[in-house]
Image: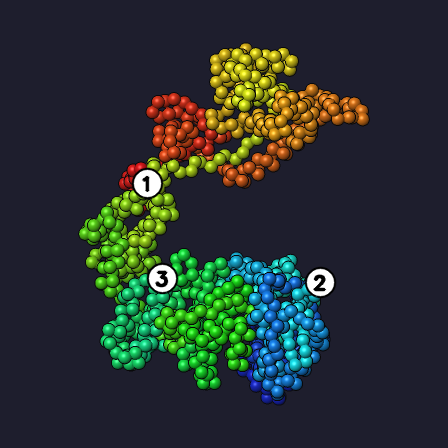
Amino acid sequence: MLIDSGSKSNLITDKSWVYLKQNKVKIFNQVRNPDKVFLAYGSKTPLNIIGSFEAEIQVGQNIKVDTFYVIKGGTKNLIGKNTATALGILKIGFHINVIESFPKFKNVIVDIPIDESVTPVVQPYRRIPVPLEAKVEAKLLELIESDIIEAVNEPSKWVSPIVPVLKENGEIRICIDMRRANKAIMRENHPLPTMDVLLPNFKNAKVFSRLDIRNAFHQLELSENCRYITTFITSKGLYRYKRLMFGITCAPEIFQKTLERILAKCEGTKNFVDDIVIFGQNDEEHDKRLKKTLETLKNNNVLLNDQKCQYRLKKVNFLGHTLTAEGVTPLESYIAGILSFRKPNTIEETQSFLGLINYVGKWIPNLATLTEPFRMFLRLKLSKHASIQKYWSKEQECSFNKLKECLANIRTLGYYNPNEKTQVMADASPVGLGAVLIQINDQGPRVIAFGNKSLTECERRYCQTEKEALALVWAVEHFKVYLYGKDSFELITDHKPLEAIFHPKSKPCARIERWVLRLQSFNFKVIYKPGKSNIADPLSRLCIQQRSTHEFDEEQVQQIIEYARPVAVPLEEIRSHSKRDSEIRKVWEGLNTNNWDDSVRQYKLLDTELCFQDNILLRGTRIVIPRDLRRLVLEAAHEGHPGIVAMKNRIRAKVWWPHIDKDVEKVIKSCKGCTLVSTPLLPNPLKRRELPQDAWIDVAIDYMGPLPSGEYLFVIVDYYSRYKEIKITRDISTSFTVKSLQEIFSRLGNPVSITSDNGRQFTSAEFKGFCKERCINLYNSIPYWPQQNGEVERQNRDILKRLKISQALKKDWKVELMNYLTMYNSTPHTVTGKSPSELFFKRTFRDKIPNIKDTEYSIINEDVRDRDQMEKEKGRDYANRKRRAKETELEGGTKVYVKNLVKESKVTPPFSSVPHTVLDKRGGDVRLRNDNTGEEVRRNILHLKKVEGQWQSINNDANDNVSIAA
């Protein structure tokens, strides 16, 4: 029999078929001439199939029933891939050899972080049972030979006792009581993965494999510097661990960080401590990823536990969830405790069940209605052990099943958040254990998962303290995926002695001590709370029933109506409009006849949440508002001008109608008051100024000051070369400006254009005439937007920095300013790569720095242009990303509000209430007309706020506009 990993079917020859028949091998489902076609490798001629049958095939302990096809004239019997894999005789990828001596990760030495400020504790030797002494000595020898522990021949600051645990197979496991030592061990603070973080990685995954690392912690070697913290005492003296060990609080985090680094380049591979899952969209992708992962583990000397490794699975349990081809679902065991509830038999059990229900009642709709049949029992004033079976009716049965359904519903259960405070409530009854995982945030406590377990006959004979201790240990291990590696969590019990038993200094009986040591890797605190507040109690007592529908209680519904209706809308008005509203009438018909009109199909999806009470439609605890009253409700909800999120939260709590969120957004956008104080439009994408063709074509001018001396600096900058000149003056009039430019132009010539701000000396008729007679184009930047004249503004910033330096050094600022100007014009610019003087005058300046020879000017304009463009594009892209810039659709005729750039007082709104009309737009430069005065102004787009249109409900006709006053 040959194994053919390329075949999906099993084939046997006709001779083998005759042999099986002669020996009366049990076969069934025999078929003649099956509709199946097989081609031999490299051949186009189909094989001659004469029949098929099913039979049982066994290899060792593995048994499988499969289909076999009989081939006429065949020479070899073939076992297909699927059958061979199921029988364990075909391994995917390659097999990792088992190493005789215990391995350790290659090139990995870990250091346990130890707080030296904690006082060391040397604990005495604890005697062990005499029958176990020989086995403990043999185990110590085995650990030494495996290079896991070593003898200590000197005094140690830390010494911990051992607790031997006898396994079912007769072998011994040595546990170290590290509770005192763990006080000095600091956490690694490496996050353990959670399902909400890993969930996006499993998208489209359909094939899974799961790998388990054998004695995972022991495969990490400890640094010499930290081994002393693991020292333990035996009858043969002191020993310490050379490898990482179970019981150290930070061990999971250390191992997680190490294995993540090893598997970093393995695609489709995730791990939770020593549990590794590999996934792919199909067999080919999965096998490729699995092979890569196995090769990586082998190269790093990682030893797997072959008995626990699983390959090519269609579903796998990982991190408290089940991964399948259909998606990710919560692990059934976390809600099985609820689904396995039996109905309560006594008053005490009823009270316990109601305690759990009330705890999560915040997320259960119609809670009072559903629990009323049970509260009836409490009003009978029976003893707590009295039976309630004779009072149990169909009404109680329906409510009980519905409450179980609500408890197990994922909408009732919360999603685990590793950053929130976590509690585990555990309880033991005479017949079982119960546990609830809870997280607490600003909204209060929320149940994450449930769990329960029946006690064995032996466990039922434990004393109550042992049962309660077992409940705590079992609860922590049951919710291990949520608690392992967490900084701290609380264990809640209603058994007071457990607070002392689980204290690090306690010395409990042998059985409880073994249980306590199982929790050494968890960081928790046991807290006592009275039994009445322990919601895990019913989980340890009750079991299964089916869910059913519920009815609405009129008194409860009436309370909902009174609480939920807006104060501004009388109840009678809601009832009156509901009767006349055509949409609500169609919902009534749909609920009563189950014949839904297409116009109310949105309501049909919510039919289980809808009910009528006195002609008022409710969705759960919220009133469904008729069309004609929605405007009034929106006005009431917008009183005080809340933002979008706040208004949605405010209105959702009491009322509902289709598209309510969109209507809220439209109301706020159309509110004039909210618009005037809200954030302006987003900036346009940054547009860099193109480099002029040559020097002294485009220049920028500006006045800087006044300085402390009362003087100003007149700065002029060339856009091409960045060459600049500075004049010191006390006069900033137009005449002085013209006179200064005449002197400069007499030396350098007239430029093609001048860019300036909106100072009066630059906007005067005299200055405009000066530019016009010299054919110079004058460009004034947008008012209150100095960025448009950015080149000279940036130069002013550099000049101011030098003035501050001269002030700090108590030097003549005028001399220092000239020194700076010489330095600047002779230093290569960061953008162009050439000095301003070199680009401007086509020669280099001679300064105080010696030069080996005079340089002959040689420059290619294109090089400068390319470098300028590249640097500007980099700066533009960075600025656009940082400012989240985008092109704004602001066309001519658009109504906008203009920012108040000069505020009268602190309460002046950011935007003026006078609307303006957009005339035209060039990039971020917008020309506007005041709608009141007709005056034209220019503003940058960031100083504008678009006037939104009037609010219109999606449910209303186009002509039914509703506006909300500011």
Separation of marks 3 and 1 at Cα, in angstroms: 34 Å
For residue 580, above or below residue 795: below
Kind of element beneath mark 1? loop
Q: Mark 3 or mark 2, which is nearer to you?
A: 2
Distance (Cα) linking label 2 and label 1: 67 Å
Q: Position of residue 961 (x, y in %)?
A: 29, 39
Residue 260's x, y, as percent? 62, 61
Q: Mark 3 or 1 closer to N-term?
A: 3
**Whole-Å distance between the Cαs marked 3 and 2?**
52 Å
The single residue placed furthest to the right in the displayed view is 852
The quadrant of the picture occupied by the C terminus is top left
Residue 688 lies in what quarter of the image? top right
- Residue 549, given in percent of the width and then of the height, sits at 31, 68
Residue at 55% x, 32% y: name it. Answer: 687
Q: Amino acid at mark 2?
A: Asn
Q: Quadrant of residue 100?
A: bottom right
Question: Looking at the picture, which amino acid does disc 1 mark?
Answer: Trp
Foreground pick, 21 / 904: 904
Residue shown at 42% from the left, 79% from the top: 432
Determine if residue 691 is in view: no
For the residue pair 235 and 336, the one nearer the viewer reads as 235
Q: Are marks 3 and 2 in contact (CB under 8 Å)?
A: no
Q: Amino acid at mark 3?
A: Trp
Q: Which residue is denoted by mark 1 in the rendering?
A: 951
- Which badge, 2 or 1, is on the more N-terminal residue? 2
Q: Secondary structure at mark 2?
A: loop
Residue picked out by circle 3: 363
Residue topped by disc 2: 107
The residue at 46%/59% (across/down) is: 420
